[in-house]
Image (cartoon, helix red, strand yellow):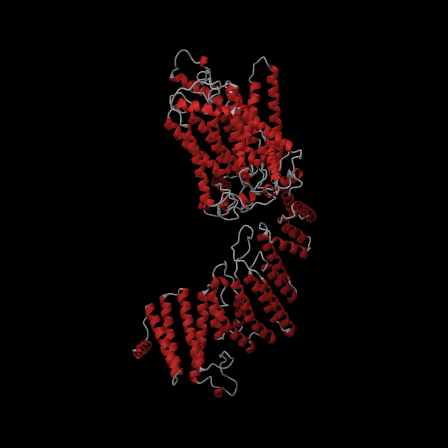
Amino acid sequence: MSEPVSATDKPRNGPASPGTAHSQMCAGLVPSLVVPLTLAIAAGLLYANTLQFGFVYDDDFAVVKNNDVTGGGPLSAVFIHDFWGQDLRSSTSHKSYRPVTTLFFRALNILGGEWLPWETEEDDPGTGPDPRPFHAANAALHGVLTAQVYWLARQLTPSRLQGSPTVFAGVAAALFAAHPIHTEAVAGVVGAAELLAASLALAALALYLSAARAGRGIVRWTALAGVIGLGWLAALSKETGVTVFGAIACLELLLPHRSPSGPRMHRAALLGVLALAVAAYVGLRAALAGDHLVRNYRIVENPIPFIPSRLARVLTTLYLHALYARQLILPVQMSADWSFSCVAIVKSMGDPRNALSLLLYAWLLAIALAAKPWSLMSDWRRVLASGTGARVPATPSSTSTAEEAGVDAKIQLIVAPGAAPGSALYTARWRLFVTAGLIVGPLLPAANLFFYVGTFLAERLLLMPSVGLAFLVAEQLTAGLSGPRSNRVRRAFSALILASILALGGRRTLQRNRDWESDASLFGSALKVCPNSAKVLLNTAILSRRSEAWDVSLVLLDRALDVVPQYCDPHYHRGIALMGKMQMSEGIQELTAALSCPDTAVDALSDLNKVYVNWMDESLTQRDWVQSMDQWAQVLVHPEVQRIEEAAVAWESAALTLVATNQLDESGKRAERLIMKAMMKLDQLEVVSAAPDETHRIRQPASEEGLERLVECMGTRFPVMEAIAAEGGNLTSPTVKAAMYKYLDKAAPLQCHLPLKKVFGEPFASNVQPFHTKLLNAVQKVDAHDPWLQAAWAQALEAQDRGKEGVAHARAALIIFQDAAARLLAGEAAAADADAEGEAGPLPLGRDGGSLEPAAALSAMTSALSDMTALMIRAGYSRKTLCDLQQHAEATLGVLRTLAEGRDDHLALLEAKSIEVWRAAEALGCKPSADAASAATAAAHDEL
C-alpha cells in the first residue's frame, strides 16, 4: 500500500499510462513488503531458542494425552470435544470449544510424525508427538502476527500521522514483536490458540476496513460475509476471538468509514449483522456444550467467587484489572501461574494496592472523556440524516468532511462524525477505539465482571491487548520521529526511547523463553514470583518428588496446604512421597484421603490398587495376604468409591482362602469374623444412586435394594465356607457338596449367580461377577463328574456372557446323567449287585450324596435338556447343531421312558417333555423322530 498523498501533490498532467502505472506499482510493492517481512522474520527469530524445547505444563493434556490430536480418536470427535479432548457436554469439561486449534495441532502431529525428515538417532518413536513442529509453528505464527499488525497499523494510522503511515506501522509492529508478554503464548505450545485467534481476528478487522472503503454495496456486503467467517474462525480457535466483533462495532460507532465513490452501508443494519454473528456463535456453543461456563473451578484457580465480602470481591477484581495493565506495560515479573494466593485478596479500602486500581480507571476515564462521548449522539444524528440526503446545520463539533480536510477519497481511511481528521477530537476518539476495541475488549471475557472464570490471571490473554498498546505507544513515538527536522532533539529522544524499549523487550523475551524449556525451569521461575501460590507449590513439589527429593516435596506440599487448607490435591502427592520414603502406612492414609478429591480420585484409587496387589503378590504368609485383601475391600466401600460388589468379592475371596487350609478351628473362626465384619460394613453403608459427576468422579452408583440382595447372598453362601473349614479344605467332601447343593437351591430365587446390573439394571453401571462364580468354580473343578455342579456352572458361565462355554458344561451334565440312566437300566445302581471285589458300585449322583434313583434321574435329565436347549439358542448355535441336539434329546427321552415303565406320573411327565421337544424341533425346522411325533399326537388326542 503506497503512502497517502495530499490533494496538492496529485499529478497535474492527467492519468499515467498503463505501463507507467504498472512500473510504479511494482516499484512501490517491493519496498512496501520489505519492512513487514523483515519485522516478521525478526519476530520469529526471537523465539528460535524455543525450537528444541519439549512439551511443558498444559501441553501434556492438550496435545500429548489428547486423542483428538494424536489421532487416537475419530476426526469427528474434534467437533464434539473440548480443547482437552473431553466430551463437551460432560460436567467435568472445561467448556473450551476450540476445534480450529485442535485441528491445527492434529495437522502438526501428522506433519512431525510422518512428513518431516528431522528424526535423529536419539529420537524414540512412540514417545508421543514431536514438539519441534509445534514450537516452529508458534514462532512462525508470531512472525505472521507481526506482519498483520504492520498492515493493520497502516490502515488505522491516526490522521495526524497520515504523512508517516510506514513509520507508524513499523514502530507499532516492532513494539508488538518485542513485547515479552508474548512468551507464554509463543513458547508454550497451547498458546497456539491465542496466536490463531489473534491472527484471524486481525485478518477480520483488516478485511472490514477494506470493505468499508469498497465502492459498491454488494462488494462491501460480500466482504462483510468474509469478516464474519474470519470472526467465527477466531472464536473457534479461542473464545476471546469473538471480541473482534466488538472491536468492529467500536470502530463503526467511534470512527465510521465513508466513501464518496458509492453508497454507504446502513450502519444500523451492519451492527445488527454483527450482533447476529455473535448470537450464532453463542447458539452453536449452547447447542454443543449445553452450558457455556466452567463450573468446576476452585479457590486455588480463581479466589474471587469465594470471597465472602462483596467489598473485597469488588476491590480484588479491580486490582486484578490493574495487574493486567501492569503486566502489559511493565512485564518485569512473569509467571506461568498466578493462582491463589500469589496475589493476596484486597480486603479493605485502606489497602495501598487500591492506588494502582484507581490510577488505571482514572486513565480509562480520561481516555473516554477526551473523546467527548456526549457529543456522539448529535454527530450520529447528522450522519444518519446525511445518508438520506437531509441537511442538518453544522455544529461546532462537526464542521469538516474528508474532502474538506484535503484527504484523497480513495485512500482516506477513517472519518469520524463531528471530528475532522487531524483534529484533537478525532485523535481522542481514535485512542478510545484502540483502548476499548483492542485492549479492554479482548480482556472482558476473563475480567470476572459478567461471569467468573477458571483463571485469576493469565499472561497469554494479553497477546491481543498488546496490539492496542503497541498502537498507543507507536502514536507518541511516531509523532516525535516524524516531527520537524529542525527538532533534532525530540527526534533523537524518540529514537532512543524506541531503541531502548526494543532492546530491553527483546532481551527480556530471550530470557523468559528459557523458563519454558522444561517443567522444572518453568515452575522454578514461577516459585520466585509466586512463592505463596498453592498450585505453584504443588507443581514444584511434584517435580521434586519425581527427582526423589522426598523431603523437599513434602515441605512444599505442606506449605500448599497451609496456604489453602481445603486444597485436596496435595494429599495424593503427599501419599506418593511418603511411600517413596517407605512410610507406607502414612502414605496409604493420604491416598485414602485423596479419594475424596475430584482431581486425584482416579489416580489415588489406581495407586492404592497397585499397592495392595503388590503386597498380595509378595505376601509370605496367608495372614498378610488376607489382611491386604481386607484393607483393599475397605477402600472399595469408601463413600467416594462405593464399589460394593467388588468389595464383597474381595472379602469372600479372603474368607475362602482362610477356610481352604488345614487349620480347622482357627481358619473357620477367622473366616467367620471376616464375613461378619464385611456384612456389617455393607449393612451400614448409605449408598447413592446418582451417576458420577465433577465432584464424585469415581463413585459407582448403587441402590439399597441391590445392597440388601448382596448381603443376603453372602449370608446364604457362608454355610458352604463353614463346611469347607470343617472338612479341612477338602472340596470333594460329601459334606461340602451337600452344603453347596443347599446353597444352589436357595441362591436360585435370589439370583445370586447374576451381577447386580443384570438383576436391577440402573443405577448399577457395570457387570461385576459375583463371588458365586468363584466359589462354584472352586468346587466344581475338583469333581468334573458331578452333573449338578456342571449344570450350575453352565448357568454361571451364561451369566458372564460366555454362553457357548456354558453349553459345553450343560452337555457334559446331560451326558453324565445319561450314563447314570443307562447304568440304572442295566441294574448297575443296585447296591445288591455291587461287585464283591469292589469294582463298580452305586453312582453317588444324588443331591443327598447317595445313588441316583430313577425319579431323580428323570427330573435331572429333563431339566438338563431344557437348560442346554435354551443355552444353545441364546448362544447363537447354527440350525444344524440345534437339530442334532433335538435328536439327542429324543434319544434321551427313549432311555427315560424305559426307566419310567410302570410309573404313570413319570410317563405323563415324559409325554409333556416329548411335546416340548417336538414343538421345538418344528419351530427350528427340524424333522422330529417318529416316536416323538407319535407321542405328541397321542398327547394331543388325549387332550381332545
Q: On screen, 198 above or below 406?
A: below
Quarter containing the C terminus: bottom left
Query: Is residue 937 shown left or right of residue 613?
Result: left
Query: Is residue 940 shown left or right of residue 333?
Result: left
The percent coordinates of residue 759 (x first, y second) are: 48, 64
Q: Nearer the viewer, residue 175 or 72?
A: 175
Q: Tell me if I can see residue 681 in this picture.
A: yes
Identified at 46% across, 64% down, the residue is 802
The percent coordinates of residue 488 (x first, y second) are: 60, 15
Q: Nearer the viewer, residue 816 or 912?
A: 912
The percent coordinates of residue 850 (x first, y second) are: 51, 81
The percent coordinates of residue 424 (x first, y second) are: 53, 19
Rendered image quadrant of residue 638: bottom right
Residue closest to the far top: 13
Query: Is residue 456 shown left or right of residue 864?
Result: right
Q: Disc count in the image? A: 0
Query: Is residue 388 shown left or right of residue 298?
Result: left
Q: Tell me if I can see residue 329 in this picture.
A: no
